[in-house]
Image (cartoon, grey):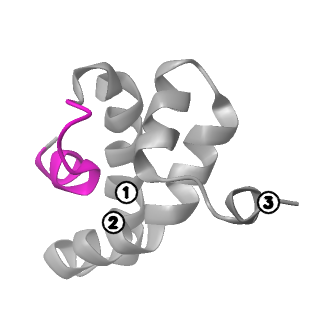
């Protein structure tokens, strides 16, 4: 087994997978950033149910707008703005 196979995919690899319709890539992206997005939402909303809803909305927006991501940029900076 190569070292590369043991590593997690990069954000760019996940983005490319999502753009190609790979549901597992989207699930991996959600798993990677859910806690961070939820924490940001909770910090603003101060309500766990609202924060969870906002987090789900954020990932839905990511899925719908992933085609606009410029792959030469940092993923999370783009996601935060979207």
Q: Are marks 2 and 3 in contact (CB under 8 Å)?
A: no
> What is the distance, in whole Å, between disc 2 and disc 3 at their CAs?
32 Å
Question: Which type of secondary structure does the marked residue at label 2 adopt?
Answer: helix
Question: Which mark is first along the chain, 3 or 2?
Answer: 3
Residue at 26% over, 56% down: 76
Q: Which mark is residue 2?
A: 3
Residue at 11% over, 47% down: 81
Residue 56 percent across, percent down from the top left: 43, 49
Viewer-nearest of discs 3 and 1: 3
Q: Are marks 3 and 1 in contact (CB under 8 Å)?
A: no
Question: Which mark is first along the chain, 1 or 3?
Answer: 3
Decide which of 5, 45 is in the foreground and name it. Answer: 5
Residue 61 percent across, percent down from the top left: 32, 34
Residue 72 percent across, percent down from the top left: 20, 37
Residue at 33% over, 65% down: 37
Question: Which mark is first along the chain, 1 or 2?
Answer: 2
Question: Which type of secondary structure does the marked residue at label 1 adopt?
Answer: helix
Q: Are marks 2 and 1 in contact (CB under 8 Å)?
A: yes
Q: Which mark is residue 37?
A: 2
Q: State which region is magenta.
A: 70-81
Quarter of the figure that contains the C terminus: top left
Viewer-nearest of discs 2 and 1: 2
The residue singled out by tag 1 in the image is: 55
* Residue at the extreme front: 2
Residue at 47% over, 29% down: 16
């Amino acid at each position: 087994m190569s070292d590369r196979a043991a590593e997690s995919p990069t954000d760019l690899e996940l983005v490319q997978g999502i753009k190609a319709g790979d549901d597992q890539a989207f699930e991996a992206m959600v798993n990677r950033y859910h806690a961070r997005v939820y924490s940001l939402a909770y910090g603003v909303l101060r309500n766990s149910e609202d924060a969870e809803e906002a987090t789900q909305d954020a990932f839905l927006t990511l899925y719908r707008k992933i085609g606009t991501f410029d792959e030469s940029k940092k993923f999370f900076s783009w996601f935060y703005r979207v």
